[in-house]
């Protein structure tokens, strides 16, 4: 069974940094692109970032480009999201998600989420 | 960008009765490869999203057969044949044909 467990969420001041982690199990991690999606309280879903199975290709939403960095350690089956220059509008629950071919078009493979973790909460406030 | 519009935004339903949610896209979701990358997600209160349906009508692993998807082009529907208490939550349509867009969500609650 696929299992994703996020950690690292916390209260941080505006301008601060945080690193989220997502430990994966139950599937061959390096065979799948992975993504981060966030959800502000009471709001809808916002895709944040994606990374190919090898880690060589990364993708970002315009709202986080230049501030967030996605990476993965395939030897540890772990996905990361380094968040710098945090703003109040980054406050949200952050979910990591596994992708699956067939959920999105092949050129947008990093959007094809099929299984989601429980999420970790990031609060940006002074 | 493709805009996804769901109706209704709120759907009070009676246990055991059917429910239906509509999702309309601002342009056709048929990809050049012939597939239509339209999915449905369920988010129960306090839970992460869960994939229910992909490519219009394919149920994801473990999804009960009371959930079904249909449609084509720009108009899509999620149906729950007999609503159960565990079906309460917000349902999102999601397209992955051209970039990624989510619908705004439909809240299903029990009358």
Image (tube, coloured by chain):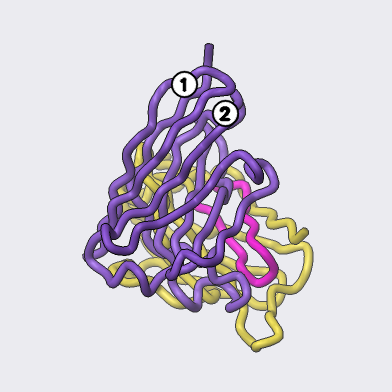
Q: Chain of mark 1?
A: A
Residue contact at pointers 1 and 2, CB within 8 angstroms: yes
Q: Which residues are magenta?
A: B91-106
Residue under the image location 26 percent in, 63 percent down: A2
The picture places residue B28, in percent across and down from the top left corner, at: 75, 73
- Identify the chain drawn in yellow: B
Name the side, left or right, on which A97 lies relative to B92. left
Name the side, left or right, on which B37 lies relative to A21. right
Q: Chain of mark 2?
A: A
Pick out the residue farthest to the top: A126
Query: Which mark, by number, is residue A86?
Result: 2
Pick out the residue farthest to the bottom: B34
Mark 2 neighbour density, 10 Å: few (under 14) some (14–19) many (20 or more): many
Q: As rendered, which of A20 and B82 lies closer to the eye? A: A20
Image quarter (top left, top right, bottom left or bottom right) of the N terminus of chain B: bottom right
Mark 1 neighbour density, 10 Å: few (under 14) some (14–19) many (20 or more): some
The residue where tag 1 is placed is A12
Residue under the image location 67 percent in, 42 percent down: A63
- Identify the chain drawn in purple: A
> Residue A75, located in which quarter of the rendered image?
bottom left
Residue under the image location 51 percent in, 37 percent down: A83
């Amino acid at each position: 069974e696929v299992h994703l467990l996020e950690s690292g969420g916390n209260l941080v001041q505006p301008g601060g940094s945080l690193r989220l982690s997502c430990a994966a199990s139950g599937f061959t991690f390096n065979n799948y692109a992975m993504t981060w999606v966030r959800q502000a309280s009471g709001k809808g879903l916002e895709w944040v970032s994606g990374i190919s199975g090898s880690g060589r290709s990364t993708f970002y939403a315009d709202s986080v480009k230049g501030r967030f960095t996605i990476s993965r350690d395939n030897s540890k089956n772990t996905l990361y999201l380094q968040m710098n220059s945090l703003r109040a509008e980054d406050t949200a629950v952050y979910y990591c998600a596994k992708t699956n071919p067939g959920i999105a078009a092949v050129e947008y493979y990093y959007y094809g989420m099929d299984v989601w973790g429980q999420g970790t909460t990031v609060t940006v406030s002074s | 960008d493709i805009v996804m519009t769901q109706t209704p935004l709120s759907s009070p339903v009676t246990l055991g009765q059917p429910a239906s949610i509509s999702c309309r896209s601002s342009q056709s979701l048929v990809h050049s490869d012939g597939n239509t990358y339209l999915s449905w997600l369920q988010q129960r209160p306090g839970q992460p999203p869960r994939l229910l349906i992909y490519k219009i009508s394919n149920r994801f692993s473990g999804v009960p057969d009371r959930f079904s998807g249909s449609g084509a082009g720009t108009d899509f529907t999620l149906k729950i044949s007999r609503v159960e208490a565990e079906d309460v939550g917000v349902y999102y349509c999601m397209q992955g044909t051209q970039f990624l867009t989510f619908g705004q969500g439909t809240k299903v609650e029990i009358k």
